[in-house]
Image: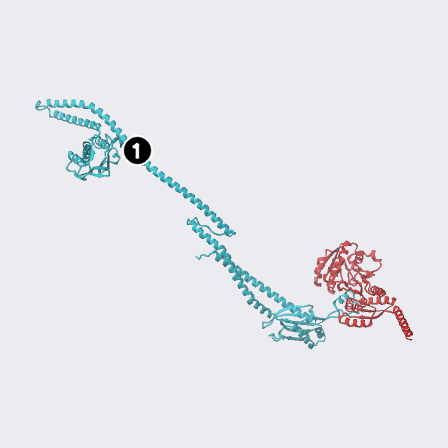
Chain colours: A cyan, B red
């Protein structure tokens, strides 16, 4: 669809209006001019025929019916016809006699074709009519009656006023006849044509051109600032609020521009304020995020600390309990052990060959279980008696190899060692670390039930020496993974829940970290990190 | 010798002069009468003038008739100049205007000029008798028939009788009568004027206005006035005879006599000149009794009055 601008619309409709007014005015003035010219022609006709009618010689000539006497009056009439519009003249006598009829040479219509007035006795005043002949010639026809007067009008009125006796018989006017003249309107047509081509059309053309020019100028005056406003509005809409409309006119457009500038200024202020608030909010948000992350970290730390604390407390409580219980059970168990030993000596085959085999088996079971109980008690005592490690510079690879050699690893387990060579010496209590590693390896071996793999590796990581015991066993359920270092927690049917808790205690006393990663059905990784530089355990 | 001759010569001259003066003092005064046309009204004026001149020893040298034509007037003026009259009586507007234009060294008395003010007949040698009767006298005459009336209508052409209306307006107002005017410029407007005035007026005053009063229009005015029982009041008894109710007008013979009297007065002056324009010293009230009857007017009270003519 074609986009039509306001300038085009304004210029088009204004020009259309001007053209319409121009045409209407031209038509009106042409009609007026024509009417005026026709009126003037009528006046000239009346004037000419009046002068002819008042010519005394005409009356005399009519009274004696002498055509030749009209030569001079007609000559005078033609002289008076300055515009040369007189076409014909005719003199009719009462009752109906044509005394004279002549026409100008240029008149195409024959004089006999020009109508003659009938019943001239009935004419009492001027008669005017327009007629067109068969060959298209038009004439303004004037007829006037000619009277022979006996006295002046005032005296006629005096006779009427004072009265007349029978001796007065000359008060009536006598009609001699009529004079008819015809004027051609041809000159009016020529004048109208001249006016049309020399004045109306050029003037109309100039008016239309000037109108278009003026309307274009006015439209430009209106449209230019509007376009500027639109352009600036676009820029403002696209976010450039620094744009200002520079229109200084005192009219409505100027007012609009001023209001627009004011609006843009206010908008800019608002947006600036908004951006300021947004920046502040962003900063606050950032600070809050920072605080939040700090809080999360702190929370984690607190959780860890709490867990450690809980674990430590648990260890302490369990240690105290175990110490008490072990101490109290140890002596009775020793007494039972001795009693069983003595009983076994007395009830042996050598002494009593017919002794029931079963009784011997029972005694064996009792002895075994007493050993087992002793072991548990020892473990518990060992747990409670984890002492401050005695640190010596040790090669961790040696410690690891020692631990592996002390554990009986089933054959269906493939053992892989991935130990970094040239590891730095580390200050540790080798016995305690060895105990930890044995515990971890035993656990791993117990987790692997069939054709599994056990990978033990060492490496230096930053300021730590890392020992990793990785098995492809059954893994630890996710919900239990956090509890494995808790004392008395075990997933094994015959476990005591002491081993990993002891390991945790030993590594903690070495200022190290022990951690686990496990996925059920895939395997478990146990990590031990021992610091290369010795620190006081209490300070950690 | 020479001295005696001179003395005789002087005595003869003185004697001749005295004789001439006495001849002059007792010489017969002559007058020439010029009438505009040959109508009975003018002839009556001539008759009255002749009678009075005879009494006053004024000889009428010639009586000319212009026959209503201006051209003849010039020839007659030439003849009058040859006759060298002491005074000229011009009867009618044509005669008055012709002599006014051509003669300024002989005293002129004019009369029978309708609405003379239109023709500016005021020169140092011109004396005249107005055709119109003083408006107060006209009103008195009309009121004697109609009694007091309030609204008097008048149709007039300002170019012809505007001066009469201008002069009469104040006097009519002073008489307690409201003048209802209607201006026309063509006799064709008379019927419209009558339609407008009828019903608003108690009487219609017909002025000597040739636009208003024509042979055709008078019949219409008369019949319309009568149909609407509006009295028609005129300034000529001719219209009363034709059917109008009343007129206040001069007697033509009396006008002739008055003109002769003015002529005598002028000739008696040491330097004959103008006595101005005077109203007729005698006038008559003419009433159409038939019309009065139709209008239902009682005329008993005024029937015994003098100077009242009744028609028919």
Query: Which quarter shows the N terminus of chain B?
Result: bottom right
Residue A427 seen in render: yes
> Which residue position is annotated with label 1?
A302
Q: Position of residue B11 (x, y in %)?
A: 90, 72
Most foreground residue, B268 or A273: A273
In the image, A290 versus A539, the foreground residue is A539
Foreground pick, B22 / B197: B22
- In this rendering, the answer to whether A105 lies above or below A478 is below
Residue B234: % across, % down: 77, 60
Question: Based on the displayed image, in which of its 4 quarters is residue B193 positioned?
Answer: bottom right
Query: Which chain letter matches label 1?
Result: A
- The picture quadrant where one finds residue A504 is top left
Residue A120 in view in this figure = no
**Residue B229, percent across and down?**
75, 57
Above or below: residue A171 compared with residue A483 = below
Residue A479 versus residue A219: which sits nearer the camera? A219
Q: Is residue A184 left or right of residue B97?
A: left
Tell me if mark 1 has few (under 14), some (14-19) or many (20+) residues whose alpha carbon lies within 10 angstroms of its own. some
**Residue drawn at 53 percent across, 63 percent down:** A206
Q: Is residue B32 left or right of residue A305?
A: right
Question: Quadrant location of residue A366?
Answer: top left
Residue B68 spot, x, y in % from top left: 77, 69
Tell me the quarter of the image containing the C terminus of chain B: bottom right
Report the number of discs: 1
Q: In this view, which residue lies farthest toward the bottom?
A: A68
Secondary structure of the residue carrying tag 1 is helix
Q: Is residue A403 left or right of residue A54?
A: left
Above or below, comparing residue B154 to residue A186 in the picture: above
């Amino acid at each position: 669809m074609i986009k039509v601008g306001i300038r085009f619309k304004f210029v088009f409709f204004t020009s259309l209006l001007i053209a319409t007014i121009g045409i209407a005015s031209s038509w009106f003035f042409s009609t007026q001019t024509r009417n005026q010219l026709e009126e003037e022609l009528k006046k000239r006709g009346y004037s000419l025929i009046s002068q002819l009618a008042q010519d005394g010689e005409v009356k005399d000539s009519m009274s004696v019916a002498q055509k030749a006497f009209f030569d001079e009056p007609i000559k005078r009439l033609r002289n008076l016809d300055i515009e040369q519009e007189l076409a014909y003249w005719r003199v009719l006598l009462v009752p109906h006699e044509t005394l004279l009829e002549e026409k100008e040479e240029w008149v195409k219509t024959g004089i006999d074709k020009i109508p003659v007035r009938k019943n001239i006795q009935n004419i009492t005043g001027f008669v005017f009519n327009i007629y067109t002949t068969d060959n298209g010639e038009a004439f303004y026809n004037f007829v006037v009656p000619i009277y022979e007067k006996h006295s002046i009008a005032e005296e006629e009125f005096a006779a009427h006023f004072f009265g007349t006796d029978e001796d007065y018989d000359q008060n009536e006017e006598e009609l001699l006849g009529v004079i008819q003249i015809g004027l051609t309107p041809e000159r009016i047509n020529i004048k109208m044509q001249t006016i049309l081509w020399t004045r109306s059309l050029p003037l109309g053309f100039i008016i239309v051109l000037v109108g278009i020019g003026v309307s274009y100028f006015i439209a430009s005056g209106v449209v230019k600032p509007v376009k500027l406003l639109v352009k600036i509005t676009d820029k403002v809409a696209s976010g450039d609020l620094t744009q200002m409309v520079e229109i200084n006119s005192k009219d409505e457009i100027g007012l609009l521009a001023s209001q627009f500038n004011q609006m843009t200024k206010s908008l800019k202020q608002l947006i600036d304020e908004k951006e300021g608030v947004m920046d502040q909010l962003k900063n606050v948000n950032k600070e809050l995020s920072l605080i939040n992350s700090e809080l999360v970290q702190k929370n984690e730390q607190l959780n860890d600390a709490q867990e450690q604390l809980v674990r430590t407390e648990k260890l302490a409580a369990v240690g105290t309990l175990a110490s008490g219980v072990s101490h109290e059970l140890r002596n009775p168990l020793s007494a039972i052990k001795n009693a069983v030993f003595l009983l076994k000596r007395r009830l042996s085959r050598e002494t009593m060959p017919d002794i029931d085999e079963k009784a011997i088996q029972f005694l064996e079971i009792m002895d075994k279980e007493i050993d087992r109980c002793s072991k548990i008690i020892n473990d518990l005592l060992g747990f409670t008696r984890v002492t401050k490690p005695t640190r010596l510079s040790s090669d961790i690879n040696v410690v690891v190899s020692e631990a592996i050699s002390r554990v009986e690893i089933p054959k269906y387990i493939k053992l892989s060692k991935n130990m970094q060579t040239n590891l730095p010496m580390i200050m540790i209590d080798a016995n305690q670390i060895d105990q930890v590693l044995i515990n971890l390896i035993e656990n791993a071996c117990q987790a692997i039930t069939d054709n599994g793999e056990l990978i033990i590796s060492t490496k230096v990581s930053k300021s730590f020496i890392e020992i990793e015991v990785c098995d492809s066993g059954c893994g630890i359920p996710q919900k239990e993974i956090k509890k494995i270092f808790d004392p008395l927690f075990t997933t094994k049917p015959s476990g005591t829940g002491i081993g990993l808790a002891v390991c945790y205690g030993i590594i903690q006393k070495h200022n190290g970290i022990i951690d686990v990663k496990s996925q059920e059905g895939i395997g478990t990784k146990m990590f031990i990190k021992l610091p290369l530089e010795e620190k006081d355990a209490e300070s950690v | 010798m020479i001295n005696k001759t001179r003395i005789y010569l002087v005595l003869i001259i003185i004697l001749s002069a005295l004789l001439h003066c006495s001849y002059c003092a007792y010489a017969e005064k002559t007058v020439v009468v010029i009438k505009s046309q040959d109508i009975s009204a003018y002839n009556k004026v001539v008759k009255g003038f002749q009678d009075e001149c005879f009494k006053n020893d004024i000889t009428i040298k010639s009586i000319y008739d212009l026959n209503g034509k201006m051209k003849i007037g010039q020839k007659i003026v030439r003849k009058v100049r040859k006759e060298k009259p002491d005074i000229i009586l011009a009867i009618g507007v044509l005669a008055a205007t012709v002599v006014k234009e051509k003669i300024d060294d002989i005293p002129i008395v004019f009369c029978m000029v309708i609405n003379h003010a239109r023709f500016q007949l005021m020169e140092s040698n011109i004396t005249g008798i107005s055709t119109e009767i003083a408006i107060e006298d006209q009103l008195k005459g009309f009121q004697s028939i109609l009694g007091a009336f309030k609204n008097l209508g008048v149709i007039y052409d300002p170019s012809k009788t505007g001066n009469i209306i201008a002069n009469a307006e104040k006097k009519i107002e002073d008489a307690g009568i409201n003048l209802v005017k209607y201006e026309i410029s063509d006799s064709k407007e008379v019927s419209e004027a009558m339609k407008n005035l009828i019903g608003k007026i108690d009487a219609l005053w017909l002025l000597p206005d040739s636009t208003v009063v024509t042979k055709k229009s008078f019949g219409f005015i008369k019949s319309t006035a009568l149909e609407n029982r509006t009295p028609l009041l005129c300034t000529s008894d001719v219209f009363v005879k034709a059917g109008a109710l009343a007129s206040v007008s001069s007697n033509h013979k009396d006008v002739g006599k008055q003109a002769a009297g003015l002529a005598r007065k002028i000739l008696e002056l040491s330097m004959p000149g103008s006595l101005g324009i005077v109203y007729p010293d005698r006038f008559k009230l003419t009433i159409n009794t038939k019309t009065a009857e139709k209008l239902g007017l009682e005329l008993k009270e005024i029937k015994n009055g003098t100077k009242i003519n009744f028609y028919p």
